[in-house]
Amino acid sequence: MAIREKLERLYFAFEDRYYAALDHVNKVIPIYKIIDPIDRHVPSFVLFVLLIFLVLFWFFLWPLLFAVQQEYAFTTSIAVIDAETSKPIPGADVVLYIPKDNNYFKAKTNEQGIVRFTISTKEQLATLDASLSITAKDYEEIKGKSISLSNGEKYDFKIKKIGIYFKNVIEIYVVKNAPSSEKIDDRIITITFSCLRGSAPNTIIKHGLEQPFKVEKPIGCEGLSATASAQGYKPETMSLEGKETVIFKLEPITIVEKTGTLEVSVTEHDSTAAEDVVVRVYDASTNSLVTQKTTDASGTVSFDGLKPGYYDVVAISNDNRTESKQNIKVNAEEKTQLAIKLHAPEPKFNYKLFFKIIDSESKNIVPDADVIVYMDQYFMKKLRPDQNGIVSYLVSEADKGKSFKITVIHPNYAIVTVTVPVLEISVTTPTIVEIMRLSAYETNYAPVAIIKANRYYGSVPLTVEFDASSSFDPDGTIVRYEWDFGDGTTDTGITKTKNFANKGTY
C-alpha cells in the first residue's frame, strides 16, 4: 500500500505541475479551449505522459530493437567453353558453394555460355573462396573444384566432350643457357614427364639434331611438367600446362680439369741465365698460341694450369734469336721441366778490311788478282778485287782487334803478303796495296796452299776434316798434295780426316 500511495502522490504532483504550466501558457495562448474537450474523455495529462514515452521510445529503444542490417553485393561471372572448339556452351548447370556462409547458388549459362552470380555478404569482400561444379550434356563434369573468386571478375572454364581425345601437342626445344641460345645439337637429350594426376607421356630420348621434340598431353593428365637433361649440362624442370612451345635453357656443368705445370729454363750459348726472353707455348695439334711469359733473372718461367697434352715451346730473345722445342708432353698434376739454350748472337759487322791493289810502278789498278785473307794464322776467304781494284771484307765487333793479313797473287806480279788495318765501316778511302810486276824470267810461281778445317780447337780426342781444294798454282797445275799434321804423321790427297788423340797445338 505504501508504494501505491507514493505513486499516487507522485502522479498528482506531476499532474499539478502540468496544469500549472498550462495556466501560464493559457495567459498567452488560450490552450484550454483545446485541452478541455480532451479532458472530458481522457485526462490530457495522461496523453502527455504517453507522448513523452513515445518520443523516448523512438529515439532510444526503436534503433536497438529494430536495427536494419546492411548487406553487400559480391558479383562474379563464370563462362563455360568447349575445350576443343573454344565455343561457349549454353544451358550448362553451374553450382557455386560458399563454405563461409554454407550457401549454394545454382544457375544455367546463357547463350554466351555465361552465368552471373550476385552473392549477398555481411561485409565488403575483395575475394571469396568457393567450390565450383559444372554439368553439361555430353561433356565431362567439373565437380567440387576449389576456386578463389575476385569481386567483379569473370572466369573461363574449358570442359572436354566425353569420349573425344583431347590432343594438346607441345613443342619442346633444348638450348644452351647463353646469349646466343644455341640449340644443344651435339649430344643425346632426355626429357621425362610427370603429372600431378593421371598418366604422364613416355620419356623422350633423342639426339639434339631432331629438335623440336613433340609431345601430346594425355587425357586426364593434370599438372603436366617435364625435366630436360643432357650430358655436360644441369637438368631443368618446367611446367608445360597451358603452353604450346617450351624452351629449356640448360646450364653447362663446369668441370674442373686436372692440369699440369711446364717450367722452362732458358740459357745463353755460354750457359748463363737468359733474362727477359719471351717464352711462348703453342698447342702442338692446332699450332694456336696458348700462353706466353718472360723469363726472370734466373732465366726461368713457369706455366701453371696447362691441360694435359703436347705443346711446342718457342723462346725469343731481345735480339730476336729464336729456339724451339716440339711435342713437349705435359701430364696432369705433374711438373715438366724443359731447358732451352740460345745460339750465339750473329756477329755485328761494324768494321771492314778495305784496300785497293795497284801496280807499284804505273799505279794502275790490278783487278784480276787473287786475294787470300787470313785472321791471325787462320785462312778466312779467297777474294778478287772489283773493277776498281778494291777489295772489301766485313769484320765483326768481336774480331776487330785481331791481326789480318792478305796474300796477293797474280801471274804477272810477285806474290806479296801484307798486314792490312781494320777500318770503320763508314770509311770510304781504301788502304793502298802495291804489287811489283815481274820480268819474263821471274814468272814461275810456286803453288799457293789454302787449307780449310771444320774445327780449329776442341777436347781430345778431336777429329778434324781438312780440305785443300781451294789451293792453286798461279801459272800451272797442282800435281800432288802432301800433308804434315805436326804430330809426326803425314798423308797425301786433296781432303783428309785426322784424329788428334793428345792435347797440344799442331
Image: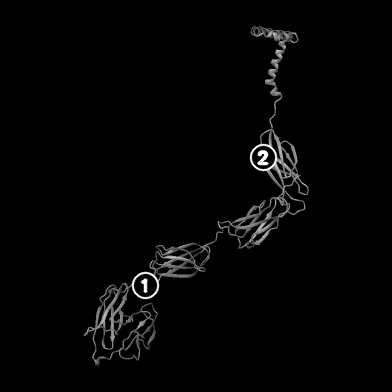
Position of residue 259 measured from the top left corner of the image (x, y, whole percent): 52, 62
Sequence-wise, which precedes: disc 2 or disc 1?
A: 2
353 horizontally vs 216: left or right: left
At x 71%, y 15%, the residue is 50
| Front residue (pair 169, 250) | 169
In the picture shown, does residue 197 fall above or below 492?
A: above
Q: Quarter of the image containing the N terminus?
A: top right
Position of residue 115 measured from the top left corner of the image (x, y, whole percent): 72, 42
Q: Quadrant of residue 492?
A: bottom left
Residue at the outermost bottom position: 441
Q: Quadrant of residue 412?
A: bottom left
- Label 2, on which residue? 152
Position of residue 416 measured from the top left corner of the image (x, y, whole percent): 26, 84
Residue at the outermost right position: 137
| Front residue (pair 66, 365) | 66
Amino acid at circle 2: Gly
Q: Which mark is residue 173?
A: none
Amino acid at circle 1: Glu
Position of residue 320 measured from the top left corner of the image (x, y, whole percent): 39, 68
Of circles 2 and 1, the one toward us is: 2
Describe the element under mark 2 as helix, strand or loop.
loop
Label pair 2/1, CB-CB below 8 angstroms: no
Question: Badge 1: how crowded within 10 Å, few (<14), some, or many (20+)?
Answer: few
Q: Is residue 206 visible?
A: yes
Total residue callouts: 2
Q: How is the image coloured?
A: one colour
- Label 1, on which residue? 346
Q: Quarter of the image containing the C terminus?
A: bottom left
293 horizontally vs 213: left or right: left
290 horizontally vs 186: left or right: left
Q: Quadrant of residue 174?
A: bottom right
Describe the element under mark 1 as helix, strand or loop.
loop
